[in-house]
């Protein structure tokens, strides 16, 4: 169940209760499955008072891909795929990265940017302007989009090219990170990068404390295309922020021993799947033990390890439905970005969340390169980003996160809309100075507010 | 949309000066809450409540005119409140207690109480259910009472109005199951409020704040029925099955 959140077997519209990956905040919408562009145009022109929204694979954590009482489009039928001679990819907005990657690898190419799961759509990747382990080198997904075909509220399909007229460039930039609120991304042309093999060469460092970890990343990340640190979110005191830093680049064919040339997993079947459980097996004790074991298992220092792309980029994709592990009430991911001058907020966040015993196994620290100044709602800004998974049942979580928000904003930082399920309109407005410009552009291209989501209503986007 | 940490962003309190309703608004106060609509008769008490909530840091508090027994006005009222933005939680908290002896001596007074407590509530609950369904999410909180669970000699008119309301809300909870709309029925025992200040408290009496806490926890758990205090669930289960001859003699 790399969840589409929707059943693609039928084209009939169905009323469905939808949530994000965090399994919180359900709302009911009329889910439609257009079979072609004409169906999408018709659906947009027929949208009622509650509006319409394209939903990707449902991997946003909160309510970004929901539209309670309105129409939600499942674009899985818009998944055409063509690799051009120059290496660019022309792909439907509903295509999954998991379907794109094998095609690219067969031609010695790879995605220019990939997040930690391949079970997302191309349209979703653009709408959230996702980032990956190479942000410090290659920027976010939107930076590699040559053009998109955007269906706007007037029923017109506009080809917006990154080297087109200034107003097209502005709409393209607002659509990258625009959370689906500017229109429906039907097709995109995206640059790709060479992948000489389907393996990566990885250096791993186990680091005992946060200062050492951050210093290593500041000093050494530039030498690697990919860099990310797993942090033990439950360690405290002198061990606060201890973690495992993995950095690497694509491996040359000559480096890959024949027994390593494992094929990239095809399709979307995970190796194991978590069944629904009434009681979460994850609690403070089990996760402390897990994190301890994970930390200890990592080598203190290992260089030149050859790994498959899937285990390197998508370790959690091997476990289907891992979001159910946090229990029935669900979980959230708190992800913020701060400039280097706000690096203290990383420590504060780890301290405060460890302080309330928030059980987390996914805490990820990464350095961002420069953000996309022209994209008003694109998340990355140069400096640090920290992402922490926490079950919502954690006591005291609301106050701790509200307080961290203030520190993030005071440091000139912001929260990630694709992860959000609890911020306020004021917090988002303060973190995104471009929000006013986004609203002005939205008012121009979608004057009646046809494209809406539970997120846009909750945060007044 | 109520956020992932169970914090509503908007509330509609029908019975906008109700002690239990206002205690619930205070209990649901958070940085996420930015719209509170108090529906009540125009009065200085209502003005005072708006001022008090606003000065205690609740943002976006407004009042609208609401007369529970004037059911013909409810459609326009509720539609206009929802038209200005989604409502995450609708609290149905209006009602009159009345005086049992007066009800028996003046049946017209009993009819008036039934018009407010039951007929008025039928009107707003069903209309709110429509509007909540149309937005695909939200909660309807209905203030019932253990007095409706088994009518007692000492207040059976009031009890009968709550029995009717409780039955309506129970059916509505089932009707709305799976729609994204959640119905929470709250059955408090004796609550110390302005409405009961002249009465001797019954056993297991609670404050409006305790009822509010029950509402918050019921919303969080997605419960359909909460008793306040929780022990009343067991007590009422016993009382419901007592032989009539015994029940009649109980000093309750």
Image: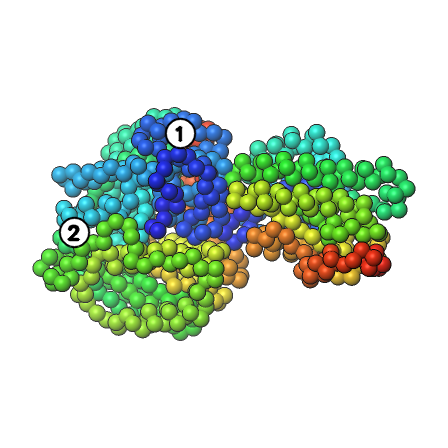
Q: Quadrant of residue A251?
A: bottom left
- The residue that appears at 59% across and 45% down in the rendered structure is B174
Q: Which residue is mark 2?
A: A195
Q: Is residue A236 left or right of residue A200?
A: right
- 1 vs 2, front mark: 1
Task: Identify the subunit bearing mark 2.
Answer: A
Task: Identify the subunit bearing mark 1.
Answer: A
For the residue pair A324 and B15, the one nearer the viewer reads as: A324
Q: Position of residue A173 (x, y in %)?
A: 32, 38
Q: CA distance from mark 1 to mark 2?
A: 39 Å
Which image quarter is the C terminus of chain B in?
bottom right
- The residue that appears at 32% across and 36% down in the rendered structure is A185
- The residue that appears at 41% across and 63% down in the rendered structure is A360
Q: Which residue is mark 1?
A: A44
- The residue that appears at 44% across and 55% down in the rendered structure is A332
Q: Secondary structure at mark 1?
A: helix
Q: Position of residue A234 (x, y in %)?
A: 42, 68
Q: Quadrant of residue A63?
A: top left
């Amino acid at each position: 169940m790399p969840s589409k959140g929707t059943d693609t077997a039928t084209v009939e519209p169905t009323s469905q209760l939808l949530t994000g990956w965090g399994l919180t905040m359900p709302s009911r919408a009329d889910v439609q499955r257009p079979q072609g562009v004409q169906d999408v145009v018709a659906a947009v022109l027929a949208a009622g008072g509650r509006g319409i929204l394209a939903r990707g694979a449902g991997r946003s954590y909160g309510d970004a891909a929901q539209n309670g009482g309105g129409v939600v489009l499942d674009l899985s039928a818009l998944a055409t795929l063509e690799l051009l001679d120059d290496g660019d990819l022309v792909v439907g907005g509903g295509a999954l990265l998991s379907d794109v990657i094998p095609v690219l690898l067969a031609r010695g190419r790879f995605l220019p940017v990939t997040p930690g799961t391949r079970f997302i759509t191309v349209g979703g990747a653009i709408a959230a302007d996702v980032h990956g382990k190479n942000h410090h080198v290659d920027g976010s997904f939107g930076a590699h989009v040559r053009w998109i075909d955007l269906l706007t509220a007037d029923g017109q399909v506009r080809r917006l090219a990154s080297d087109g007229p200034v107003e097209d460039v502005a709409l393209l930039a607002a659509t990258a990170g625009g959370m689906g609120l500017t229109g429906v991304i039907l097709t995109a042309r995206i640059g790709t990068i060479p992948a000489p093999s389907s393996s990566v060469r990885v250096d791993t460092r186990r680091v005992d404390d946060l200062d050492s970890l951050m210093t290593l990343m500041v000093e050494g990340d530039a030498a690697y295309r990919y860099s990310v640190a797993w942090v033990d979110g439950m360690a405290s005191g002198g061990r606060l922020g201890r973690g495992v830093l993995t950095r690497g680049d694509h491996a040359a064919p000559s480096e890959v021993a024949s027994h390593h040339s494992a094929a990239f997993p095809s399709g979307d079947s995970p190796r194991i799947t978590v069944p629904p459980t009434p009681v979460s097996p994850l609690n403070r004790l089990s996760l402390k033990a897990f994190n301890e074991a994970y930390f200890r298992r990592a080598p203190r220092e290992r260089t030149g390890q050859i790994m498959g792309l899937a285990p390197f980029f998508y370790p959690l994709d091997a476990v289907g439905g891992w979001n159910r592990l946090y229990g029935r009430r669900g979980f959230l991911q708190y992800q913020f970005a701060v400039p280097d001058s706000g690096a203290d907020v990383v420590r504060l966040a780890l301290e405060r969340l460890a302080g309330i015993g928030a059980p987390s196994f996914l805490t990820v620290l990464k350095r961002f390169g420069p953000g996309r100044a022209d994209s008003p709602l694109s998340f990355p800004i140069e400096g640090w980003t920290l992402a922490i998974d926490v079950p919502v049942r954690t006591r005291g979580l609301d106050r701790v996160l509200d307080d961290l928000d203030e520190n993030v904003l005071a440091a000139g930082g912001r929260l990630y809309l694709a992860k959000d399920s609890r911020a306020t309109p004021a917090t988002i407005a303060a973190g995104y100075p471009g929000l006013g410009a986004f609203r002005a552009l939205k008012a121009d291209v979608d004057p009646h507010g046809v494209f809406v989501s539970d997120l846009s209503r909750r945060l007044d986007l | 949309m109520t956020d992932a940490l169970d914090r509503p962003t908007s509330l509609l309190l029908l019975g906008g000066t109700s002690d239990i309703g206002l205690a619930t608004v205070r209990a649901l106060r958070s940085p996420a809450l930015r719209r509170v609509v108090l529906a009540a008769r125009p009065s200085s008490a209502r003005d005072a409540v708006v001022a008090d909530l606003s000065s205690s840091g609740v943002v976006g508090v407004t009042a609208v005119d609401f007369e529970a027994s004037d059911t013909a006005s409810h459609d326009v009222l509720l539609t206009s409140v929802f038209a200005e933005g989604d409502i995450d939680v609708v609290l149905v908290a209006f009602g009159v207690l009345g005086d049992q002896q007066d009800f028996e001596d003046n049946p017209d007074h009993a009819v008036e109480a039934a018009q407010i407590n039951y007929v008025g509530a039928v009107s707003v609950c069903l209309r709110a259910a429509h509007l909540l369904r149309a937005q695909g999410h939200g909660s309807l909180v209905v203030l019932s009472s253990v007095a409706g669970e088994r009518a007692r000699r000492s207040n059976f008119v009031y009890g009968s109005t709550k029995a009717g309301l409780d039955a309506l809300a129970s059916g509505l909870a089932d009707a709305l199951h799976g729609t994204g709309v959640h119905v929470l029925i709250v059955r408090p025992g004796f609550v110390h409020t302005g409405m009961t200040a002249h009465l001797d408290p019954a056993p297991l009496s609670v404050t409006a704040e305790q009822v509010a806490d029950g509402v918050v926890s019921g919303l969080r758990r997605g419960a359909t029925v909460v008793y306040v205090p929780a022990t009343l669930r067991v007590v009422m289960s016993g009382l419901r099955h007592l032989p009539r001859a015994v029940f009649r003699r109980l000093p309750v």
